[in-house]
Amino acid sequence: MRLAVGSDHAGIELKAAVAGHLQAAGHDVTDLGTQDASSVDYPDYGAAVGRAVVGGDADLGVAVCGSGIGIAIAANKVPGVRAATVHDATSARLAREHNDANVLCLGQRLIGVQVALDAVDAWLAAGFGGGRHQGRIDKISALEHEPQPQH
């Protein structure tokens, strides 16, 4: 599987651990940065991961920041992205099964490396359940095409 990974400075260590884990499992991993601990803005990296997934350069993406929240918000601004911040294997599995999450977001300051790797593995092993969840995903997708109010 082709996976894009990205993080800001607050997630660089966890991103590196996830990327190494994914590569060791045989996945093709593209690291979209950042590459050092210099302060950067998480929206740039969340958007980059989201664009790689929606643009077809990656099948799925993993984005990391301090909490996993800001980078998820940024990734979700890219039409077609369904980014979910998760905290364990169960929330990761459900993000895929119920929400068809195509970008997994993690918070380096909130979860340990092993919990993050277990979450990534659970997310990759899960599949979208479809059924009753498909209508909800369709409604989420429709929101991306609604006209925006003019102020």
Image (cartoon, helix red, strand yellow):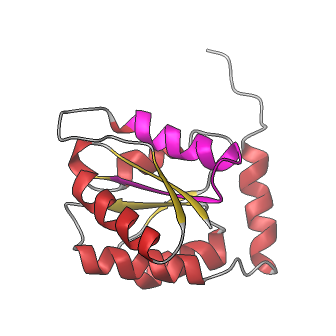
Left/right placement of residue 137 relative to residue 28 reads right
Left/right placement of residue 38 relative to residue 127 reads left
Residue 25 against residue 148 in the figure, above or below: below
The N terminus: image quadrant? bottom right
The C terminus: image quadrant? top right
Residue 63 against residue 122 in the figure, above or below: above
Q: What residue is at 41 percent from the left and 69 percent from the top?
A: 86
- Answer whether residue 70 is visible to the viewer in this image: yes
Q: What stretch is highlighted in magenta?
A: 43-64
Q: What residue is at 33 percent from the left and 58 percent from the top?
A: 15
Q: Of residues 131 and 89, which is closer to you in this image?
A: 89
Q: Position of residue 144 (x, y in %)?
A: 72, 41
Residue 139 against residue 92 in the figure, above or below: above
Residue 56 lies in the magenta-colored region: yes
Q: Position of residue 128 (x, y in %)?
A: 70, 77
Q: Of residues 134 and 3, which is closer to you in this image?
A: 3
Residue 14 lies in the magenta-colored region: no
Q: What residue is at 41 percent from the left and 36 percent from the top?
A: 43
Q: Position of residue 31 (x, y in %)?
A: 43, 49
Residue 79: which quarter of the image? top right
Give the total of numbered labels: 0
Residue 109 against residue 86 in the figure, above or below: above
Left/right placement of residue 123 relative to residue 8 reads right
Q: Residue furthest top?
A: 151
Q: Of residues 149 and 118, which is closer to you in this image?
A: 118
- Answer whether residue 66 is visible to the viewer in this image: no
Q: What residue is at 77 percent from the left and 29 percent from the top?
A: 147
Q: Position of residue 57 (x, y in %)?
A: 65, 47
